[in-house]
Amino acid sequence: MGVREGEGGAGVSVAGRFTELYGYAPEGVWAAPGRVNLIGEYTDFNDGFVMPLALAHTAVAAVARRTDGVLRVHSAEMGRGVVELAVEELVPRRGSGWAAYPAGVVWALRDAGHPVTGADVHLTSTVPTGAGLSSSAALEVVTALALNELFGLGLGRERLALLAQRAENAFVGVPCGVMDQMAATCCTEGHALLLDTRDLTVRQVPFDLAAQGLRLLVVDTRVKHALGDGAYARRRAGCEAGARALGVRTLREVPHAQLRDALSRVDDATVRGYVRHVVTDNHRVGRTLALLDAGVLRGVGPVLTEGHASLRDDLRVSCAELDLVVSAANAAGGLGARMTGAGFGGSAVVLVEQEAAEAVTEAVEEAFAAAGHPAPVIFPVVPSDGARRIG
């Protein structure tokens, strides 16, 4: 198996490193991508619409079955040795650090009645961590895909995504929606994924930026604010409070045309902002889809910037660094930009003309330097395939 470990790695294959660690060859090598979300933020746990696309950056796992109830996991990036766990003793929210993500998948599969009797796993990932690009979902999905195949579970991609989400929700303790896991399992090369998170129907939407002389940049601010995790949970609780106040199961059920009336029935100003964001962002997904279907990709830019303002002002999940990306990029000729992911740091996306990409990149870097922020990491998006076996 000639799969290389990491981007431009040290010439050691993932399978070869597995063999060094465990003393025998793996049964296969699998990959699952990170994702960037084009539009539709904080809508997935409200049964709404999202439009992510898979990155070329992936988590890669070499895996072999065990029959003795032992799970051994190792990460090339963590550098802390092999973590060994007993599958019968896996308990939600009991720590395990980074290993909680693959361990949570084993727990979720077993809790659903699937006969996973242990595994040896070696993982490596090029998905930036803490960047809002779903590095955790990539780890979960690559583990789920490998175990599904090795143990002959016969689970479809939708079911794998749901089990990976359950691992993160119940085992790790992060109340995320299902977008990240569905993106990692279902995205296809050259497309954005329109996902209806209420019924998990998907549509592959052609997203050929190069054909129109455009580029989508990811700007990783390299900032992760400590308040992010708890603040995410509070936003989810606030959205649920808004739904209760309006007498609906989820905010997906609030029509955009009736938003003004709905807002007049929500007393809490903070919750009112959450409702306004979710309803308008669902509408922005629909507008973006219409633009992509019509081949008017440049028209997506202003929708992105509008979405950022909503995330900043109504949901209050942006931060100074993300706001600076948006303002600097747009001032330098960007067509539009917004934060992507849960916020409080992480990444933004910027839509630019191909010939303006370098100037916009330089403008953002200069703005960060002038503000005294660490240099951001900026790279173009290549819409890529979802999870797959690669060796």
Image (cartoon, rainbow, N blue to C red):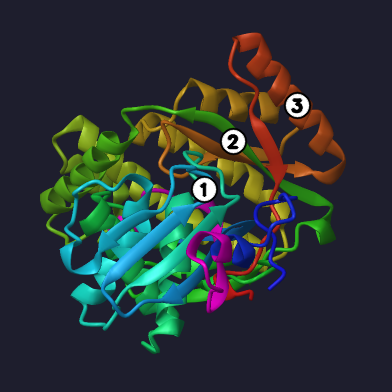
Who is closer to the viewer here, 164 or 318? Answer: 164
From the image, tell me which residue sits under label 1: 133
Question: Are there few (<14), some (14-19), or many (20+) residues within 10 Å of tag 1?
Answer: many
The amino acid type found where label 2 is placed reads: Asp
Look at the image and give the residue range highlighted in magenta.
19-46
Q: Which residue is drawn at 20% across and 42% down?
A: 238
Q: What element carries label 1?
A: loop
Who is closer to the viewer here, 99 or 292? Answer: 99
Tags 1 and 3 in contact by the CB under 8 Å rule? no
Q: In this view, does 316 lie above or below 276?
A: above
Q: Position of residue 106 (x, y in %)?
A: 30, 69
Q: Earlier in the sequence, mark 1 or mark 2?
A: 1
Horizontally, is 94 left or right of 179 in the view? Answer: left
- Specify whether residue 36 is painted magenta: yes
Horizontally, is 297 left or right of 212 in the view? Answer: left
Q: Which residue is drawn at 31% across and 28% down?
A: 227
Q: Which residue is drawn at 57% across and 30% down?
A: 221
